[in-house]
Amino acid sequence: MTTIELDTSPTTTIDARGSYCPGPLMELIRAIREGQVGDTLAIISSDNGSKTDIPAWVHKAGHELIGVYPHEGYDEIVVRKLK
Amino acid sequence: MHSVLILGGGVGGTLVANLISRKIKKQIDAGQARVTVVDETGEHVYQPGFMYIAMGNQDPRSLRKPERRLLDDRVDLVIGSVSGIDEADRRVSLADGSSLDYDYLVLAMGSRILPEAIEHFEQEAHHFYSEEAALRLRHALDAFDGGVVVVGIAGMPYKCPPAPLEVALLIEAELRERGLRAKSQIHFCSPIARAFTIESVSEMVTPELEKKDNELHTFFNVEAIDPERRTVLSLEGEELPYDLLVLVPPHKGAQVLMDSGIAPAPGGWLPTDPHTLNVGERENVWALGDATNLPLSKAGSTAHFEAPVVAERVAALVQGRQPHARDSIYTGKVMCFFEVGDGKGTLLRFDYEHPPKPPAPSRLWHVGKILFNKSYYQIVPRGRGGSIEKRL
């Protein structure tokens, strides 16, 4: 298990476990739309596709991927809203 | 008296009412049970036909039937708008001030479209999720003489997931037939990393898009429409100018379900057990069709295969017995046709454990879809589809 080491706690944590593609990505997009520039968003997903799809989306959308942190049965993906 | 109340007279509500009444007809005839459907309009609409109004020559009148004619004589029909659900008193209020008590409640209220949620959508974008909008799109296509067509999805989840891809491919085929293809571009915008949520379907349809020179834009989540520049903008920063814009509008669950505290905001999708179809921890409330939060297609087919499960569970409670194990567990079964243009289609058949393996597009599945659409009213709402499903 990997421990997330962030300077500060995420502004928002979205627990999307049990939701399947594209649920976790859509949840993150909703949080990004509602959040402020500089917010740190953590999305927790048990869907295997999230750890590739979400970083790809973050790259295209121009936000910052802080990290993908694997846990037992789920991944935690942390993103900073840049614009 | 056992009171079974079904909210919604679409595919799911109508079919589940007929299946329940068939199972408990002795109790109904003995005055020990009653089954009531509440429907807002009293008119049943075959919504998958809307796409064919826009893309073909579907007569809108043939898509509508009086709900009463589709329901078993033992089922009561109340035409009215649900204004509240009081779970403590097991009572549903209607907008006309009346109310209906229930012991068992089935929520089949579908989904609703919200084009107004995106500024300028209603003036600039076309869609095919209502009869009026589909007719308007047909007229726009008739007047179209070449240019840039953008087809996209302005919110997930939405009804009939293959439909926007089908529309992009059907428009391409139509423009080719009309000699307008050379002076047209077609863009298909997907909100996710691929053309379709299910990978195997993406793998089938992406080569079809490429073969027909439909440009695929992934991660295109519609953010805004600029009517002056006739450009649609994505959250991801992409901009696409259009001459004809076709967008799936955002969808939500029924507002009254959110207002009653049963379905959480912002989507309003009912938290539904994937196998029993009970809503949350409620043992006397079920959901089916578009209204659920299940990771399945919002499609009539889903409701069609869910209805027997709900019917068996309700009937078992009315009759004071255990539900039959085989009939009372939903496995996530969905089956739907997928048009790819040029008179060809394929079939998507899947469940929770088995993703679809769509056969190579052929005329067979296109004809299958047309025949199914034409025979819908004879087989589905009345629960006569068993033999057809077994053959597919």
Image (tube, grey):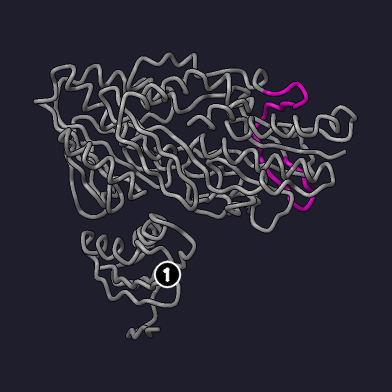
Q: Quadrant of residue B346?
A: top left
Horizontal relation, residue B215 to residue A22: left or right:
left
Instruction: State the extent of the magenta-drawn residues as a range.
Output: B71-92
Horizontal relation, residue B254 to residue B134: left or right:
right
Horizontal relation, residue B9 to residue B61: left or right:
right
On whether residue B74 falls in the magenta region, the answer is yes
On whether residue B172 falls in the magenta region, the answer is no
Q: Nearer the viewer, residue A28 or B392?
A: B392
- In the displayed structure, B16 sits above or below B174; it is below
Q: Nearer the viewer, residue A62 or B383?
A: B383
- How would you rate the neighbour count of disc 1 (Cα within 10 Å): few for under 14, some for 14-19, many for 20 or more? many
- In the displayed structure, B176 sits above or below B169; it is above
**Rendered residue at 33%/73% (across/down):** A78
Taking the image as drawn, is residue B229 in sight? no
Quadrant of the frame with the N terminus of chain B: top right
Q: Quadrant of residue B31?
A: top right
**Rendered residue at 27%/50% (across/down):** B194
**Rendered residue at 63%/53% (across/down):** B261
